[in-house]
Amino acid sequence: NVTSRPPPNPSPLRTAKFFQANMRILVTGGAGFIGSHLVDRLMQNEKNEVVVVDNYFTGSKDNLKQWFGHPRFELIRHDVTEPLLIEIDQIYHLACPASPIFYKHNPVKTIKTNVIGTLNMLGLAKRVGARILLTSTSEVYGDPLVHPQDESYWGNVNPIGVRSCYDEGKRVAETLMFDYHRQHGIEIRIARIFNTYGPRMNIDDGRVVSNFIAQAIRNEPLTVQAPGTQTRSFCYVSDMVDGLIRLMEGNNTGPINLGNPGEFTMLELAENVKELINPEVKIIHVENTPDDPRQRKPVISKAKEVLGWEPTITLREGLPRMEEDFRKRLGILRNE
Ligand code: NAD
Ligand code: UDP
Ligand code: UDP
């Protein structure tokens, strides 16, 4: 008699798996700056299980230590230029060095990561039927001849310069995304990220915001690269993560610009850092590197319209939050 049978003992394996994640999400490059903040946000949703794949080239396990041992979290040391066989529902594909000094350090590896790495993640998406989001970059616009830049601009990129492994690499990655979409019906999302800053940025990665903050804290001169009138637009990392998740969850393939339209010259940025962090610090002018874009500012009307997204944190609000994180990591407290 079936109905009188005692209820089965739950197996220890089943009880150990006390959560039932609805969505298993892969974040490549999840040990990096933006990736680790994205993981934090995804982990806040109890329906998500998060798998990070990273080769630790520019990222660090330390950025994810808050999740070690969590039953919904898994970290895999893996290089995306090698095939990856796992079962997942969504892929946030961020793996790629983002700072010029790191991506120029081994340009061949950078372009392989962009091309072969993206191809592998698309092959994975195709096999398991996952939606995939690529973090492309404003660098696809190169040294833009149109200002500000909207998504319809095709860019002005040097194909053989020292930045090309990154710019052209991301352009090919975008092409691959659309070819897999058109040819194989893969669900794709492309974000074109403009300069992003915040806690956990690599302290010595040479990017301008991390350089100026570390220099101000160490009381070393702020190095404004010539001419100093070149502009950038800086987005705080929590705003960026919000935009990436909205893009993934929405219905638009993109490409969509994600960035803060507030535009600053590098001299203005230095003056803000000086005023907010160390009024005694000197500002000096140093040489620039080749092919440095002279101006960059996103048009974000598409993100506003399609994703209902716009940045909420101004540069003057974001810089002190980053200062706090850098002071902790550098072990230099503010002299009150
Ligand atoms: P990051 O260097 O902190 O993170 C990149 C991560 O990818 C690191 O953890 C690194 O170890 C990992 N990685 C690199 N090559 C890999 C490989 N072959 N296999 C596996 N892992 C690899 O950089 P970030 O600022 O967090 O950038 C994340 C993404 O956003 C990148 O795709 C970058 O191109 C894009 N992006 C960033 C910015 C920005 O201002 N930070 C601007 C535009 C685009
Ligand atoms: N790939 C992967 N994981 C998978 C499926 C594919 O890493 O789960 C890689 C595969 O090794 C290949 C790439 O993705 O290099 C593209 O795969 P696709 O099936 O589109 O092309 P093909 O294998 O036919 O060249
Ligand atoms: N820059 C600077 N001082 C520095 C580092 C960078 O003035 O110590 C300038 C650089 O010339 C460029 C801008 O800051 O015009 C942004 O450089 P970054 O490397 O941060 O990002 P990207 O060039 O990729 O936008």
Image (tube, rainbow, N blue to C red):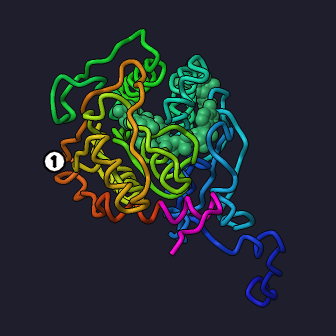
Total labels drawn:
1
Quick one: 178 or 231, which is closer to the camera? Answer: 231
Number of other residues with Cα within 10 Å of mark 1, as a class: few under 14, some 14 to 19, many 20 or more: some
Q: Is residue 321 above or below residue 203?
A: below
| In-image side of 210 versus 236 (left or right) | right
Quick one: 302 or 141, which is closer to the camera? Answer: 141
Q: Position of residue 279 (x, y in %)?
A: 39, 59
Q: Position of residue 42 (x, y in %)?
A: 51, 62
Q: Residue at x 16, y 48 (%)?
A: 301
Q: Residue furthest top?
A: 160
Q: Quadrant of residue 191?
A: top left
Q: Is residue 136 visible?
A: no
Q: Position of residue 211 (x, y in %)?
A: 49, 44
Q: Position of residue 265 (x, y in %)?
A: 26, 41
Q: Residue at x 42, y 64 (%)?
A: 320
Q: Residue at x 24, y 32 (%)?
A: 295
Quick one: 281 or 178, which is closer to the camera? Answer: 281
Magenta stretch, residue numbers:
323-336
Q: Residue at x 70, y 38 (%)?
A: 78
Residue 37 belongs to magenta span: no
Residue 325 belongs to magenta span: yes
Q: Is residue 223 above or below residue 305?
A: above
Task: Locate the N terminus by quadrant.
Answer: bottom right
Label 1, on which residue? 301
Q: Is residue 188 visible?
A: yes
Under tag 1, what secondary structure? helix
Q: Quadrant of residue 95?
A: top right
Label 1, ligand 1: CB separation under 8 Å: no
| In-image side of 65 versus 275 (left or right) | right
Type of residue at label 1?
Ser
